[in-house]
Image: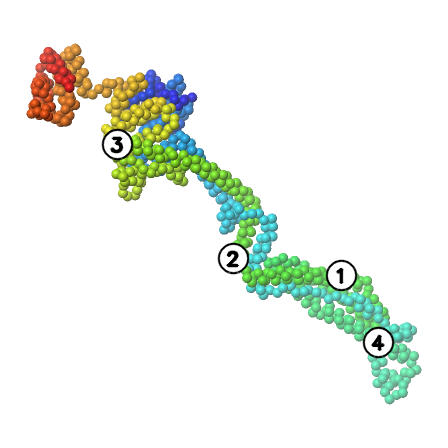
Amino acid sequence: MIRGDELLERFQLLRNIGQYDSVNAGAHIPLSTLTLIYGENGRGKTTLSSVLRSLGTGDASHVLERHRLGAANPPHVVLGFAGGITAQFQHGAWSAPMPRIAIFDDAFVAANVCSGVEIGTGHRQNLHELILGAQGVALNASLQIHVARIEEHNRALTLKSNAIPAAARGSLNVDDFCALPADPDIEASIATAERNLAAARSADAIRQQATFLPIALPAFDVDAISALLARTLPDLEADAAAQVRAHLRRLGRGGEAWVGDGMTRISGASQGQDHGVCPFCAQDLDASPLIAHYQAYFSQAYDGLKSSINETGQGINATHGGDVPAAFERAVRIATQGRTFWNAFTDVPEVEVDTAVVLRAWTAARDAVLTVLRAKAASPLEAMTLSVETLALIRDYDARRADVAALSGTLQTCNTPIALVKEQAANADVAARAADLARLQAVHARHSNPVNGFCADYLAEKAEKTATEGLRTQARTALNNYRENIFPAYEAAINTYLQRFNAGFRLASVSPQNTRGGSSCTYNVVINDVQVALTANAGPAFRNTLSAGDRNTLALAFFFASLDQDPQLAQKILVIDDPMTSLDEHRSLTTVQEMRRIQARVSQVIVLSHSKPFLCQLWEGADTAVRQALLIRRDGAGSTLAIWDVNQDCITEHDRRHALVQGHLQAADPTAERRVAAALRHILEAFMRVAYPAAFPPGMLLGPFLGICQQRAGQQNQILSQTDIDELRALLAYANRFHHDTNAAYETEAINDQELTHFSERVLAFARRS
């Protein structure tokens, strides 16, 4: 387990990565609190930075993408930390948790500032996290989790809404469709709506269609018929009536009628006689014993009875025969047609009448009654009754008649809702009723399987999204509250560093920005009190107002400002890779100063650079007890690590010449005599350049300088005393013998050791004068 306060002590193994084939010599080179690593461009500095970035972020791609070309095996890295702990990258992953490593390199610039000269969305998003720091990043990460979850909800909602058939929804959107409440009587409601719509569309036909008319079948007055059949002539004696009937029977068929007709003719035949005369034979009827009986038999009462029988039969024929049955059939047919029409708009019962059956029962009853009436008409004085069979036929017919009456009554009750249909249809809005029906059909579809399940899934997902949105709001509020404090402080810190770097510009309006893609950061560059936008289609913008040095300076300011905001800064391992890119001398010095300042506040600083002067500046000002320097040098076709003697590279050419002359004075070296002689003039020039920079600027030679010194000797603006002028002239006369500008044969000029030693002592003594 690697703790954040543990130092990186060694690069124990670098194998098959970048320029490193198999480097384990680094295992013997200890790192320190301040570690400087020098390497020429292309030797492997950025590879080391990428290895540490991978360890710090846990992103294996930073290592894998630097797999050494031509290497058969994958990258293998072993880093040693304090306490004997190692972090190993093998099989595409790190073996141990990551320490707290902060890295400034080209990748930092490209991620947080710009790629080339362009600023993209990713730069502003990364800068947003950089400004937030660990606490803010955690808040933002919580927010982004909810934002990402909402996107997942949206994708799920799209899938689940697509599962709900569009045909079922009709014109409703998914949310309105799923919100439709259930209707336990939906099918009845749909039927009513369908009728209402049909009525609205058929308003003219409804207005013209008649309501139901009564349907009735005539009854047989059984009591009256029975009474008629039972009637006789009570004034006619029974014996006389029997004799008459016996005589009439002997007369055969039609005898009674024949006799009855004859009785009406007696008066005519007896006219002018004092006695009755037979209309057929003119005989005297007074002596006939039957005449009196005939007179009683064929009396007015008898005629009345016969008339009643005939009238009853005719009445039955008129009521139950002729066109009456056909009219009944027509009424039933009209009712059936009316039912077919009106049932589309309101509930109308079926017209279930089998007219053939009714007519058969009706005809049978009628014929049976007429048959008995005909029998009665043939024997009016004979008392008769309706037979059991006839009464049964009448009862069967009455049952049919009752069914027809009940149906007629039911149809009559339908005339009330039909009247309402007529009234509503007269003022109906077809579009509104179509919409009502469509909505009811949607309700039916909404709560039918499998659509009901699809809607339940959608609503459940929507409820989860609403809950997540609530969590997102809470997380965003917490993040906004945090950002209200951190962003102004970060802007002030950035501008402080830009001022130290003498950048010539500052930042304004550094503020967070919420976008669909996530939280971002925006800012303006202020140059000459004019705010310049990050992007613009035309005119001043980031890409055309900031130089490469300005952009790198801004990146350094971002980096250092982010460190200032880090509450765990003391546990950080700080890695800085080539910070001097595009920086001028002043900014290089400021960078050195800032790095010295930050070194006291972090656990460890590792600096990689191709600039020896820059590293030397860091080296010379560092505590000798906590500094170490490494060199990346060529090793065959690759690179390796070695100890770097910084002190040797920090010596200037002037220091080397001075040491060369001083060494000659201590011990003569015949092979170095000519180099010693040539160094004397350079020592004098270097001394005069530092001692008298105004009078001896770069490019001036010592000869002309002596001329100026001679002119000012003894005056207020004197440069050198006359003694110093004479000494310098003498020293220069000797030194010029070994310089190509003043002696063409300087390479063959004879050197006397004693003379060289003498002038060497005098030059060093002159250079020590104040």
* Residue carrying label 3: 502
Asked whether, in this view, residue 113 is left or right of residue 423, the answer is left
Find the residue positioned furthest to the bottom: 272
Q: Amino acid at mark 3?
A: Asn
Mark 1 or mark 3: whose residue is earlier in sequence: 1
Question: Pointer 1: what residue?
Answer: 396
* Classed neighbour count for the residue bearing mark 2: other residues with Cα under 10 Å, few (<14), some (14–19), many (≥20): few
Give the number of the disc on residue 301.
Answer: 4
Going 90% across and 85% down the picture, which residue do you hit?
275
Q: Secondary structure at mark 3?
A: loop
Q: Can residue 642 be seen here?
A: no
Q: Sequence-wise, which precedes: disc 4 or disc 2?
A: 4
Q: Which class describes the residues within 10 Å of circle 4: few (<14), some (14-19), or many (20+)? A: some
Q: Quadrant of residue 527?
A: top left
Q: CA distance from mark 1 to mark 2?
A: 52 Å
Cα separation, mark 4 vs mark 2, equals: 77 Å
Looking at the image, tell me whether mark 2 or mark 3 is earlier in sequence order: 2
Q: Amino acid at mark 4?
A: Ala
Q: CA distance from mark 4 to mark 3?
A: 151 Å
For the residues labelled 1 and 3, the Cα–Cα distance comes to: 123 Å
How far apart, in angstroms, are the residues tagged by discs 1 and 4?
35 Å
Amino acid type, callout 2: Ala
Q: Position of residue 586 (x, y in %)?
A: 24, 29
Mark 4 secondary-structure assignment: helix
